[in-house]
Image (cartoon, grey):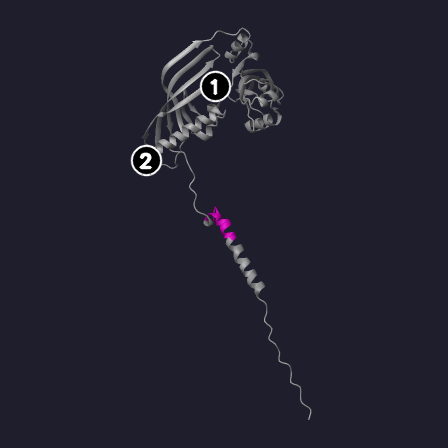
Amino acid sequence: MEETEKPEEEVPVYKDRSLLYMGIGLGLLILIMGYLTLFVDDPWKIFRKDEVPEKVLDEGNSSILNKSESMSDEEVRASLVKFIEAFYYDQRKGYFDPPSYFAKITVTFYNYHNLNYQRLKDIYWKRLADMHNFSRNWVVSSLDFERKDSKIIASYWTKESYFKPSVREQYSADIKYEMIIDEEGKIESLRDIEVRNEVANKVAPDSALLNTELIEASPAVVSQDADSKVYDMNLVESAPEFNGGQRELNKYISNNIKYPAAARQNNIQGKVYLSFIVEKDGSINDIKVKQGIGSGCDEEAIRVLRSSPKWKPGMIKGSAVRTYCILPVTFQLE
């Protein structure tokens, strides 16, 4: 008899579900990331420890100025020292940025009141223009302060000296300042409250510079001819402006200025202060050096300003007027 062949046993086939599981996993991951992106401000915050930013002054309505807060007087003093030192350090480097240090409306700045940022900046540079070779050293050990409501009222002494060309005086004095800082850590008032050891010595004029100093000392003198009146930039309703504003002016200067070889070789750095008139048509005229640093930097600053395109003129009651301005040009080696 012939043997019947047994059919081969079928081997069961299992479907590979790894791709399915991978797809489900990716789908869940996409859903989670979508949720975090849409509803969480900082998705990566859950993967890292909270970072506490270093602040000069704390924020909030009940800030470090409140004695019931955890910060001690010694800690407040340390914060004030940092704040004041940074404030004057920036100025020594030639920077004055009101939004970094001042309240939106500064109640008092020397003898001026209720100032916005632009007005504050204009007054600062105008004061500095008549203070050549200015030096200020604040005495840290003299710092005193008190907490009043939500504010800090600080006072401290400085030693200051400068040459004042408008009256040809070399001036020096010890000056006590009062600085009031609001609950947001911004200066709302800065004024001198006491002066000691004041010395003002007349300096004999240099005949070669006498005319220049006299003209610069009275920039806002109004002539008899109405068309030739020159207004100080702080007296016009709308101050002259480089087209595009301060940012475009900075860009223009940085793109066009050439560091003089002599200044680079001798490591000369600093600011050149130029006075000039913006005419009614926006052209630049009557450029003079108010305070220079030499080694070719003064001449280069004049060249760049003279080559600038027309500005937006100063305006009074909707009409363009001739306006006297001061511009600091910074020379800084990298």
**Which callout, 1 or 2, points at the residue further toward the start of the chain?**
2
Q: Residue furthest left?
A: 68
In depth, the one of 274 and 93 nearer the eye is: 93
Percent coordinates x, y for residue 187 in the rendering:
40, 28
Q: Is residue 185 magenta?
A: no
Percent coordinates x, y for residue 64 in the rendering:
35, 35
Question: Cα distance, mark 1 to mark 2?
Answer: 37 Å
Quarter of the image for residue 54 reads top left
Q: Which residue is drawn at the image coordinates 42% and 22% (left, top)?
A: 137
Local secondary structure at mark 2: loop
Percent coordinates x, y for residue 234 in the rendering:
49, 19
Q: Which residue is mark 2?
A: 72
The three-letter code of the residue at mark 1 reads Leu
In depth, the one of 272 and 185 nearer the eye is: 272
Vertical arrangement, residue 67 with respect to residue 270, above or below: below
Most common secondary structure along the magenta stretch: helix
Can residue 104 be seen here? The reply is: no
Horizontal side of 174 relative to 203 (left or right) equals: left
Local secondary structure at mark 1: helix
Q: Residue furthest bottom?
A: 1
Q: Which residue is mark 1?
A: 128
Residues rendered magenta in the picture: 33-45
> Around disc 2, counting alpha carbons within 10 Å, would you say few (fewer than 14), some (14 to 19), or many (20 or more)?
some
